[in-house]
Each structure stands twice: as C-alpha cells, then as structure tokens.
Amino acid sequence: DAKTTQPNSMESNEEEPVHLPCNHSTISGTDYIHWYRQLPSQGPEYVIHGLTSNVNNRMASLAIAEDRKSSTLILHRATLRDAAVYYCILRDISTDKLIFGTGTRLQVFP
Amino acid sequence: GAVVSQHPSWVICKSGTSVKIECRSLDFQATTMFWYRQFPKQSLMLMATSNEGSKATYEQGVEKDKFLINHASLTLSTLTVTSAHPEDSSFYICSAERGATINEKLFFGSGTQLSVL
C-alpha cells in the first residue's frame, strides 16, 4: 500500500485558514487521495477525496499537485470544532482498502 | 446523511469470555464493511474486510479464529472477539461502503471501547 507522510501536529488560531500538507511520492495512477478526521473517542469522519483535480466541498478544499506526489487539505476558516487528527490516505482502487497513517493532530486556539 | 451504528459503545468483560460487536448501516446497503482496531494515541489498524455473503478477508497478523466476522446481511456485520484477554482491550471501529461504486467515501461507526479485565 502506498504510504503518506504528514506532520505530526499543527496549530491554528480560530477563524484563520489552515493548510494541512501530505506527501505521497509513491502514489500510483489508480490511487485516490482521501482525507478523514477523527475527534477523540469517535470514529473517523469523511472530509474530502480526489484523484487529479482540485476538489471543494462544504467542509474543505483539496489541492492536488500536478504530479500527484503531494496534496494539501485546506480548511478555510478553522473553528474549535475542527480540532482533530486529520488523516491523508491513499485508497487503492484495486483493493478498496483504506489504510490509515499516523495523521496530523490539529490544535485550534481561540 | 448515511449513518453507521455500532453497538455497544463500550463493554467491560472478564478474561476468557467472548464479546460481540455489531455494525449496522442504517439507511443504505453495505456490500463491504471494514473492521479496525485502535490503541491509545495510535492510528487505526485495518483488521479485516467483511463482504456480505462471503468469508471475511483478514489482514496479515490478525487471527481469524480470534476475531470472528460475520456479514450475513447487507446492513449488518458483526465482530466477535473470542476468549478475550487484556491485550485485546482496544477501541474497535467499523466502517461501511455504500453501494457498489468504487471509491465511494466510507462511513464509520462511533466505535466500541473494549476493556478486558
């Protein structure tokens, strides 16, 4: 399974934009880039996913590098409820599995 | 939105007993469900893939006789931890994929905290 690398932790102030980076230099052509987040003592929650083009939804934006070896999850205005562990995951279309890496713990300060 | 219900949310049991955890997709049919385990301050570890009507596929290092998975219907998968021991204490999480479209997003249950005394 292709591997992703994320910073262990990041900090942000409330109402500021947050850019969460993810490196995936071994990504294959059939891997989709998924982002999930997990609040303490809860199951993960879907955030966004994409293949090649940038994606936007009500929660966030996903910017994918042209060579697809990296991506950035953008939270446009962080709130205290956005404090969570954010996982960047490559999902292999052939196996359909979602293999979690270590993720980035995002702290949001008021 | 789609909801996955996991039950119980927490369970305490004695060593040597078996514990069953249920995972239900409430408003969609899930041909595939996944079971994960998470230890404190660690990431989720995929244990097995559960397919409706067929045997589960286990990840390397996961004992299939220890963690029995049954996916008897399109809305229910169960994980039974047999003869549980303290080292099995963990947070167990299920997820379900809606429909047959490849690479749909996954919906996760709220998790089950298992404590084995």
Image (tube, rainbow, N blue to C red):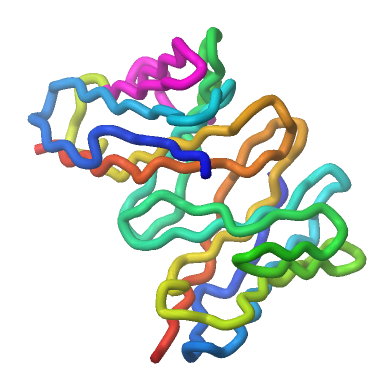
Residues rendered magenta in the picture: B59-81
Look at the image and tell me in which quarter the C terminus of chain B lies.
top left
Residue B84 left/right relative to A100: left
Residue B72 left/right relative to A49: left
Residue nearest the viewer, comparing B26 with B74:
B26
- Give coordinates of residue A110: x percent, y percent: 39, 91
Compared with A98, A7 (above or below) is below
Residue visible at 26% across and 36% down? Answer: B88
Residue nearest the viewer, comparing A75 with B87:
A75
Residue visible at 11% across and 29% down? Answer: B15
Compared with A1, B82 (above or below) is above
Compared with A33, B24 (above or below) is above
Residue A4 left/right relative to A16: right
- Give coordinates of residue B79: x percent, y percent: 35, 24
Residue visible at 44% across and 68% down? Answer: A84
**Residue A108 visible in rendering:** yes
Residue visible at 50% across and 28% down? Answer: B48
Assess whether residue A88 is covered by the magenta stretch.
no
The quarter of the displayed image where residue B106 is located: top right
Residue B69 left/right relative to B107: left
Q: Looking at the image, which residue sits at the far right?
A: A66
Residue nearest the viewer, comparing A97 with B59:
A97
